[in-house]
Amino acid sequence: MQPAEHDAPPHPALEGQPIERLRRDGVDYVILGTAHVSRASVEAVNALLDTEHFDAVAVELCASRAHGIRDPEAFKQMDLFQVIRQGKAGMVAASLVLGSFQKRLAAQYGIEPGAEMKAAMDGADARGLPVWLVDREVGTTLKRAWRSVGFFQRFGLMAGMLGSVFEREDIAEEDIEKLKQADLLESAFSDFAKGSAPLYRALIAERDEFMAARLREHGERMDPAAPSRKVLVVIGAGHLKGMSHELGHQHGAPGPLADDLAVTPPAAKWPKVLAVGIVLAIFAVIGYAFYRNPSLGKDALLNWVLLTGGLSALGALIAGAHPLSIVAAFVAGPVKPFRPGIPSGAVSAMVEAWIRKPRVVDFEQLRDDITHWTGWWKNRVARTLLNFFLVCIGTIAGEYIAGIHIIRSLL
């Protein structure tokens, strides 16, 4: 790895901007670190494109995020029923939360989230340059992060994301520039990313490796006989140091390395085994109660129904669900153990989406509504997702509380 040569005249918009220049395998990389909500970053992207010649532009985006930036209206085509049926409600909700975190910052200064990435792609299109999407799919990153940490740390993940929704304090523009020292995902998850090595690796370090490998992979495909091979790389400055180091020192074939990092690890089996074991133990206790005294058994079974169904229904009620969705939650909660793979929240959420079908205006205003916590109850799309989560949480709480209550009643 060698430092890349640079003979372009200085530009005022580039003063103080974090830029790394290096050469790898005959390709010159000009790597600009940006804040994902920053006028200065947009100006820096445009300045580099105006003052230097590039043969390609690489951006810290995956295909789905790039599509969302190029076509902000695309999410309006989302089929909410399919999202719930296919078990993607969590990924959609997480993406919306991350989007609201950016949009809340952007609303203060009249600049759209990801404007510097859009400027890079638009600039490349205007000059007829190829655009390289080098980041890992955000869904894969979130799944790897979720599965890299333990049970209690997952609550930290959820808390970090929810905190970005409920935080209302304005941020000074100079502080937004300081966000260049952190990644968007790391910022959204606050101190949890910094305090957890597995989480930090999934959110930051792995993506440094992945993006470096993708850059090398694209670089290998460039014409070696071309008079120049120079690439502008636009990434969040939280990745600038790590990705530049990986790009300069990474070994091995880039394709297989990136493919390995794009694999979603299988979910751990022990949580499901433990959950099934606990439920089976509870039903064994209920059976024993019937054996001892039919009246005692009926009381135990009733406690199971009322607690699991009641807390599931309470989750739907808190979410502001339709009365029929609340009833669906009450029915789905107690029978969840007999429907493996079908969360009680999915049953209630599908009833909610069927009765209160999202309107066009709900999709149009979704991104704006969720920037404030009340919007999760106001918007029908967001409320359906909220209903899904709160019912699932209520069911889980009901199972444990019911189990403890039933066991105590027999002692």
Image (tube, grey):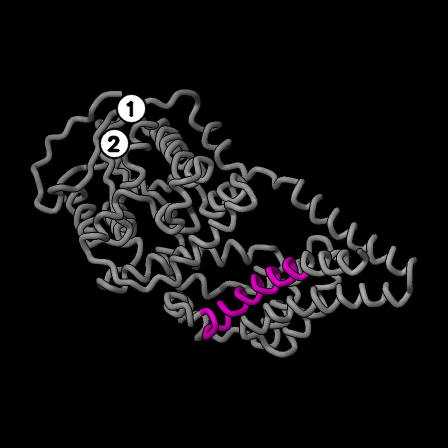
Badge 2 local density, few (<14 within 10 Å), some, or many (20+)? Answer: many
In the rendered view, does 75 fall on the left or right side of 368? Answer: right
The magenta-colored residue range is 376-398
Q: At which x and y percent is residue 29?
A: 25, 31
The answer to whether the residues at label 2 and label 1 have Cβ atoms under 8 Å apart is yes
Name the residue rendered at 76%, 66% in the picture: 303
Q: At which x and y percent is residue 381?
A: 50, 69
Q: At which x and y percent is residue 219?
A: 34, 29
Q: Nearer the viewer, residue 90 or 249?
A: 90
Q: Secondary structure at mark 1?
A: strand
In the rendered view, does 228 fall on the left or right side of 388? Answer: left
Name the residue rendered at 25%, 41% in the picture: 33
In the rendered view, does 19 fall on the left or right side of 73? Answer: left
Name the residue rendered at 42%, 47% in the picture: 63
Q: Write down the residue under mark 2.
A: 29
Q: Quadrant of the N terminus?
A: top left
Name the residue rendered at 61%, 60% in the picture: 392
State yes or no: residue 214 in magenta: no
Q: Write down the residue under mark 1.
A: 24
